[in-house]
Amino acid sequence: MDNNDIVLPRVRPDLRFNPIHENGTTCYVIEDPVRNKFYRTGLEEYLLISGLTNTASLDQLLNTVEQRSGIRLTPDQARVTFEWLSRCQLVQQNDTGKLSEIINSEQAGKKLQTFSRLNLITFKISLLNPDPLLDKIVPYLLWFTGKTFFALWLIIGLAALTQLSVNWQMFTTSAAGIFSPSNMLMIWFVWFGLKILHELSHALVCKRYGGRVFEAGILVIIFIPLTYVNATSSWKFPSRWQRIHVATAGMYIELFAAWLAILYWVGHPHTSGGQIAHNTVIVAGISSLLFNANPLMRFDGYYILSDLVGIPNLYSRGLQIIHNKISHWFLGTPLVSQKSRHPAFLVSYAVAIFIWRILVLVSLGYAANLIGGPYGGLIVTGAILVWIGIPLYMFSKRLPLLKIQNPGISRQLPIRIAITGIILLILLQVTSWQQTINIPAVVLYQDQYTVKTETSGFVAGLMVHDGTQVQRGDHLLLLENPDLEARIDDIRIQMNQSLLKSRLAHSSGLITQYQIQQENLKTLRNEQQAVARDIEKLSVSAPGDGTVLAFNLDQLRGRWLDKGTEILWIVEPGKKIIRGSAAQDDIAQLKDQVGEEVEIDMRPEGLGRFNGILERIAPRVSRTLSHPALSAIYGGPLDVRKEETTDSETDTIQSPQYLLFRPRFSLDVIVHSDLLEKLREGQRATIHVRGGRKNLAMMVRDRVSSWLNSKKRIMQQNN
């Protein structure tokens, strides 16, 4: 088709164009006052759009642009711009046929929107126009966006971070049960409240500089609600620092909430309010730094980066580069060059967001599958239909036009898909790496006996002290429990009474009464035996040979000890091992290393690196911690959850224990005898085991296999 045969569109006369000049670059913000939307374009697009009213042909338009700016644009660049104008409904249509096409296009768009509701992993719900309400409250809250508040923010932030550093150990310890079911509901409310505060701050700063906020709603990502406001009117602000202020406002106010929460938590660490404050600090930190500040997602960090580098529509331009390359390879469409101030950066950013989008989609699908339980598969299926189905539908609509532009597409497309598939398969097989399995570990005594009280009582006598050598059966301490002595006497009296009643009933011929008393006697004898066993347990004996390890043992004299209280440990100082805690996914490779040398890293403990022998691997997984030093609450690498247990006999709540979130295998490594004297019980270590080579194909296979096995377990549990 000749360029002069192309009918040029005409932009709507009600549109407003706002130039933005900064650092020698110019971009334009198009304001659509009818639909309350804003669009940002570069200089090249603006020159094309502004020249549409004075030219009659595409060649004349391109020549006019070149004369005005010295920039030579291609017909393909112009066509892309015209398609974008039409898609955003920024052109006027007097032709009835064209209007009919637009209406049909909008109806098709609504059908696609309805179809997109199958995606339950991420979707957006527009709720209201907050601008009238903001006009009323801005006079009262505008000081939050000024310099005085910023100075207050800095002072409180410095004080809060100082307090957090001083109380860091207690803060991390309090985070042990953050993912417990009882705490998750609280986290949800804290998260939602912070998001409302976050978006309100965006809106206030936008209003400060004269912007408008016409839309607010909820963005749901894997069932987690995120509020949002449409502050795109800030794009027309003349200063990029004003736009950056709008973009940073949400994170800014969330961090201020975190500062206040830290100060409150320090003063009330063990109260309900302190727990809410603790959750606020964690949620505000995660949402601000991990999500909002990420420039690869279209959140606050992206808009800040776009203004800093001076590239408008950075995200869209990046995706357009990838889309252009893919279309050129598979469909034979011509390459459209994009001029930019930083071409290398734009290409690098395009590749980064393309890879990031794939990782995010896969991660969201995996998370939704886990969270959705038995319905997880249906949720993921719906999302895949949307993520893949809509692009395929759009491609089918464009296919007739593509066949006109490239008659050989029907033959080329299958061939290039096959070539791409072969290349991917080769990359999956060839891209490999040497695995190193890192296993958190702790130093333990090899033969260690934990001595606990098997019944309750007062400590009446201590026969040992720290460092005493004992043998199996030696007496360690003696307890007294007057209640047990009184109970055994009371049972003896009841038995004598029951025995007397039994004889009287037998001599009187009262068979029923006799049988009742016999059963009562049987019950009393059983109780007597149980109490007698408890009395025997008042004398605590050594379960094995070794050296007594106890701290402040003398302070126990005269104290009441509940059943199950740890008193002391019996160890052999010369026998120590390094016990590791391995993930289930690594166990297959670790079993092949039993009896082989492994590397142990204890540099943080000042002991450097050395080798040991992997002696054994536990046959079963367990949620039990090898040692408290490995748990996150004491600075270790393993996440744990707090669980309270109840004594079935006394119906009393025992001291809480910390269990691993996921079961793990324990393994033992023995080291050379020369090193044993340097090792101290409770020291942390990392065991490095060299695994086999692994490629991407194996990783994908393992992930799919793990997913199928989890589904199989869920089905078996449901049956």
Image (cartoon, grey):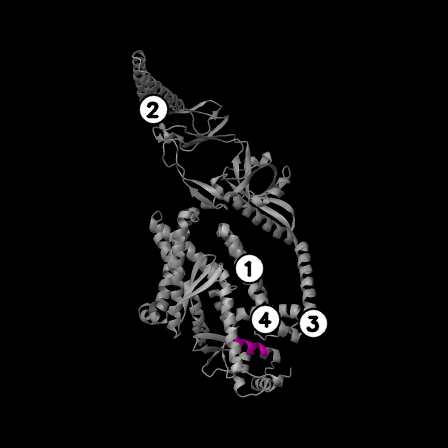
Which sits earlier in the primary sequence, circle 1 or circle 2?
1
Q: Residues within 10 Å of mark 3 (few under 14, many from 20)?
A: few
Mark 4–mark 2 CB contact (< 8 Å): no
Mark 1–mark 2 CB contact (< 8 Å): no
Marks 4/1: CA–CA distance: 20 Å
Res 360 seen here: no
Q: Secondary structure at mark 1?
A: helix
Q: Secondary structure at mark 4?
A: helix
Q: Amino acid at mark 2?
A: Leu
Residue corresponding to mark 3: 408
Residue 340's quadrant in the figure? bottom right
Q: Secondary structure at mark 2?
A: helix
Which sits earlier in the primary sequence, circle 4 or circle 1?
1
Residue range highlighted in magenta: 79-88
Which sits earlier in the primary sequence, circle 3 or circle 2?
3
Which sits earlier in the primary sequence, circle 3 or circle 4?
4
Residue at 45%, 56% (x, y): give it: 223
Q: Which mark is residue 384?
A: 1
> Overall secondary structure of the magenta stretch?
helix
State whether residue 317 is above or below residue 183.
below
Residue corresponding to mark 4: 397
Which sits earlier in the primary sequence, circle 4 or circle 2?
4
Residue 83 location, x and y as percent?
A: 55, 76
Q: Which mark is residue 333?
A: none
Residue corresponding to mark 2: 484
Q: Residues within 10 Å of mark 2 (few under 14, many from 20)?
A: some
Q: Going by the image, does 82 lie left or right of 564?
A: right
Residue 346 location, x and y as percent?
A: 57, 69
Residue 357 location, x and y as percent?
A: 55, 62
Q: Residues within 10 Å of mark 1 (few under 14, many from 20)?
A: some
Which sits earlier in the primary sequence, circle 3 or circle 1?
1
